[in-house]
Image: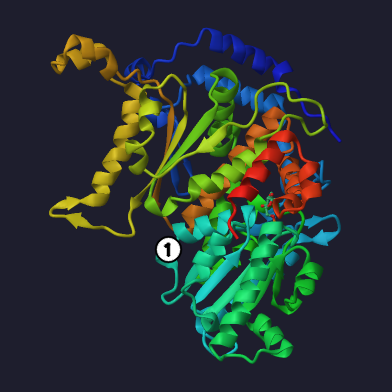
């Protein structure tokens, strides 16, 4: 195992530290002195126009950050990832989500650990596409011969967040007469609400779980199976026999997993299962068979366009010099904010309602990847890692939390994302409503960057004692990302952009961005605590005092 370069020992880090000490951000002044700043700091990434100019950086800052990337051997790490080296060291796995979107005719073929990865990927993709077509055309039917109207994806984490985010983002591409619902939470409310108005004869469940061992997903899958049997029998669609139930599962359940033996044990015919591989991390899996629900909804062609979007960004990050490389620059900017300007969080603010689940998706991608305190060789990290990602679509957020971004004491770098052509070009009288919407997108980054001085506030006739409250300090950093429209390709580009940003940050911090041991302890304890919660006095006795008294109170409160 190659030890990570400790970024804090590099010459670039020392230079950045000195640079920060003398740093006096002045976006107003910088733009006034340099009319070319916006042009110079705007980059094109496939269809995405990315304006970095409202970030708190000078040319010197960027040059030092690029030097840092070179000194931590970012290029070597990127190449290692694309080549399938086992850079997920704690699980001894390759990290090859980029292989999921390589074109069918990519040359030379990618062979990793003796496996022809390209052939494997194309085989599963073809199987998913054929199945999606069968469902979409009505060839695939339930036990009574009815075509599928509702697909229910049962999964959690990466087996949920990616598909649901992309389904919501690409709603205009969903075939008429098809709906996908997503059940993730083990709170029984989730499955109860999602199934309560469904017709079992037209419902198809997809159990999506990389490990096929996740408590939430397997519990929900069993609840779904019970619901299906109960409702089909009640509707007179099947007899209440073992054989009829098995037949119903075969027609109404498929699975996506790397553990096809466990799929079979659940009662799903492996013929109706779509595989993937341990080199696809859960949070990097929306473009694998985990996206089967999405492929059904939008169709294999649109799913293919999504993959092409991902691939365009992969090629950009792999081949573009760091100075022009958008994911690299955005990752380095995040490092600048986290490690030198003391930012703790990062907002992602889509001005596209269809992207309303994008921030939630990014939370798993970024925080499960980079929320680490040790480096990939087991030694402690040498600096802060993993900022908190969060956000909501504009303009809703403007009326909720933007106050703190504009005038609070904390530095919150923010990415603003918008598309030029809406799916619904509505007019309010003569007013183009989407144009009005985007006026907010442009206005917010302007206000954040340039603020409003006390003199400007006074000039509006504001009473002197109110002036301080109405001053906007400005110098609040933003990146603006503008796409032509929210197409499948553009969505793929956006996802891949953030995947690679996450990777770049992880490399600078020397961490393995592809394991997630931090979620294990809570899972284990939940299983240990479950008997106490169900009333086992002995198990309750073994708990710590706080947990014991909380459970005791719960047992008092619980009725029935
Ligand atoms: O709990 C974390 C996690 O392992 C995620 O990384 C993963 O996306 C999620 O659980 C679901 O896992 P699976 O797809 O194996 O059910």
Q: Nearer the viewer, residue 8 or 383?
A: 383
Figure quadrant of the C terminus? bottom right
* Percent of width and height locating residue 504: 64, 35
Q: Residue at x 52, y 62 (%)?
A: 305
Residue 156 in which image quadrant: bottom right
Can residue 104 be seen here? The reply is no
Is residue 541 found left or right of 186 in the rendered image? right
* Percent of width and height locating residue 341: 53, 19
Q: Nearer the viewer, residue 258 or 316?
A: 258
Q: Nearer the viewer, residue 392 or 422?
A: 392
The residue where tag 1 is placed is 171
Residue 511, compared with residue 176, is above or below; it is above
Figure quadrant of the N terminus? top right
Is residue 132 found left or right of 221 in the rendered image? left
Residue 296, compared with residue 397, is above or below; it is below
Q: Which SS class for mark 1?
A: helix
Q: Residue at x 45, y 57 (%)?
A: 169
Q: Residue at x 77, y 30 (%)?
A: 375
């Amino acid at each position: 195992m190659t030890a990570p370069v400790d970024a804090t020992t590099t010459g670039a880090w020392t230079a950045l530290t000195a640079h920060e000490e003398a740093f006096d951000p002045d976006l107003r002044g910088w733009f006034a002195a340099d009319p070319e700043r916006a042009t110079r700091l705007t980059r094109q990434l496939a269809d995405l126009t990315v304006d970095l100019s409202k970030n708190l950086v000078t040319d010197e800052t960027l040059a030092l950050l690029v030097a840092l990337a070179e000194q931590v051997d970012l290029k070597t790490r990127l190449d290692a990832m694309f080549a399938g080296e086992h850079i997920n060291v704690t699980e001894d796995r390759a990290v090859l989500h980029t292989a999921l979107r390589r074109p069918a005719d990519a040359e030379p073929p990618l062979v990793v650990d003796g496996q022809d990865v390209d052939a494997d990927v194309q085989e599963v993709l073809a199987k998913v596409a054929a199945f999606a077509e069968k469902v979409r055309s009505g060839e695939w039917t339930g036990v009574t011969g009815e075509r599928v109207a509702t697909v229910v994806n049962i999964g959690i984490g990466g087996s949920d967040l990616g598909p649901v985010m992309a389904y919501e983002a690409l709603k205009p591409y969903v075939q008429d007469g098809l709906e996908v619902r997503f059940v993730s939470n083990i709170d029984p409310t989730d499955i109860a609400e999602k199934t309560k108005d469904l017709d079992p004869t037209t419902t198809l469940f997809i159990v999506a779980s990389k490990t096929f061992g996740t408590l939430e997903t397997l519990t929900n899958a069993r609840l779904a199976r019970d619901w299906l049997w109960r409702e089909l029998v009640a509707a007179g669609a099947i007899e209440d026999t073992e054989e009829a139930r098995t037949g119903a599962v075969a027609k109404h359940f498929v699975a996506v997993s790397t553990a096809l033996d466990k799929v079979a044990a659940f009662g799903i015919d492996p013929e109706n299962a779509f595989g993937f591989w341990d080199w696809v991390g859960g949070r990097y899996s929306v473009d694998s068979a985990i996206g089967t629900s999405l492929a059904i909804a939008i169709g294999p062609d649109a799913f293919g366009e999504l993959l092409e979007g991902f691939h365009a960004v992969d090629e950009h990050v792999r081949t573009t010099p760091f100075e022009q490389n958008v994911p690299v620059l955005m990752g380095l900017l995040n490092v600048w904010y986290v490690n030198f300007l003391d930012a703790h969080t990062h907002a992602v603010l889509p001005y596209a309602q269809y992207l309303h689940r994008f921030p939630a998706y990014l939370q798993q991608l970024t925080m499960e990847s980079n929320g680490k305190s040790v480096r990939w060789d087991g030694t402690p990290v040498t600096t802060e890692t993993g900022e908190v990602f969060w956000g909501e679509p504009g303009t809703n957020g403007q009326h909720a939390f933007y106050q703190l971004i504009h005038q609070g004491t904390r530095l919150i770098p923010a990415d603003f994302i918008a598309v030029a052509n809406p799916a619904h070009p509505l007019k309010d009288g003569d007013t183009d409503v989407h144009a009005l919407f985007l006026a907010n997108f442009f206005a917010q980054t302007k206000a954040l960057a340039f603020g409003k001085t006390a003199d400007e506030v006074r000039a509006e006739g504001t009473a002197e004692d109110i002036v301080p409250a109405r001053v906007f300090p400005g110098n609040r950093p933003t990146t603006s990302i503008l796409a032509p429209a929210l197409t499948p390709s553009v969505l793929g580009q956006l996802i891949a952009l953030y995947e690679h940003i996450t990777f770049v940050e992880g490399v600078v911090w020397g961490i393995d961005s592809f394991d997630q041991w931090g979620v294990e302890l809570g899972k284990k304890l939940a299983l240990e605590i479950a008997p106490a919660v169900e009333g086992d006095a002995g198990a309750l006795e073994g708990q710590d005092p706080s947990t014991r008294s909380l459970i005791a109170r719960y047992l008092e409160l619980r009725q029935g």
